[in-house]
Amino acid sequence: MKDAHRQHRCFTLIELLVVIAIIAILASMLLPALQNARAKARQASCMNILKQMSLCSSLYIDDSDEWVAPCRWDPDPAATRYYYQKLYPYSPPIFSKPECGNGTVASNPMCPGAVNEEGTPVGSASTWTYASHNWGGYAQNQNFGYYSTQAWNLYSKIGEFRRPSETFQFVDSYYYHISGSSTQWSGTAPFVSWRHNGGVDFAFVDGHVAWQRRFMPTALWINKD
């Protein structure tokens, strides 16, 4: 009769350490792949948001006799002064964020890739929060119209953009507007945020979106003609 109280063999300390080491090696191999997959998912979501922003812009243009929504236009009422305030009625969930008015007011949309960016030095601003409506995940090309103390860039009609497939409208950024100034694209406190694998997502005037590695855009990307 077999012994009912047979002793079971236990793992030795060395064997346990070997198993732990193998698990650690596997985890170190899988972690970069998981992080890359997560970054790709955020970028894909960002591109989807940019497509929706472009669609809302097109709807606004159709309703506004071909006039585009300017980045900012101070002569307009305070509630409809910024591009995201003008586009908000077309998609409130896109043109708002929980950090600003609990998501009940228009604001610069958020990019899914904007992780731990709050307070990053931008231009002359050393501190800022998403609670402010003009900080967020995207900027609009300043050539769509920019009036702050004066008309720096004139209000435009969509037909004035002669190269719609080459000129961008929206781009990944911390602040709501961006020009062709080199300091807004590079240096120690740029406006643009190279948050997607060392590059940014663009939405162009014709509505298509694309990723671009870090670079300094030429006038072709920014100007109307």
Image: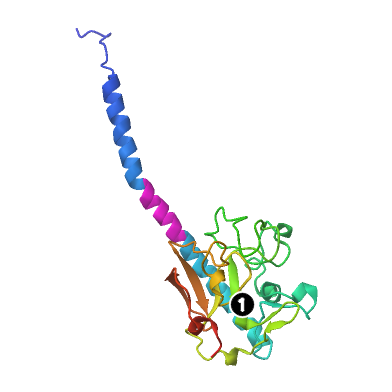
Is 43 drawn above or below residue 5 in the view shown? below
Observer-nearest of 94 and 160: 160
Observer-nearest of 138 and 192: 192
Q: Which residue is mark 1?
A: 56
Is 175 drawn above or below residue 70 in the view shown? above
- Read off the magenta span: 31-41
From the image, give the main secondary structure of the stretch colored magenta: helix
Q: Residue at x 56, y 73 (%)?
A: 52
Look at the image and say whether residue 156 sits in the magenta stretch. Answer: no
Observer-nearest of 77 and 174: 174
- Residue 195 screen position, x and y as percent: 49, 61
The residue furthest left is 1
Q: Quadrant of the N terminus?
A: top left
Q: Name the secondary structure under disc 1.
A: helix
- Residue 107 screen position, x and y as percent: 68, 66
Q: Where, by quadrant of the figure, is residue 25 drawn?
A: top left
| One can see residue 11 in this view | no
Q: Residue at x 61, y 77 (%)?
A: 56
| One can see residue 17 in this view | yes
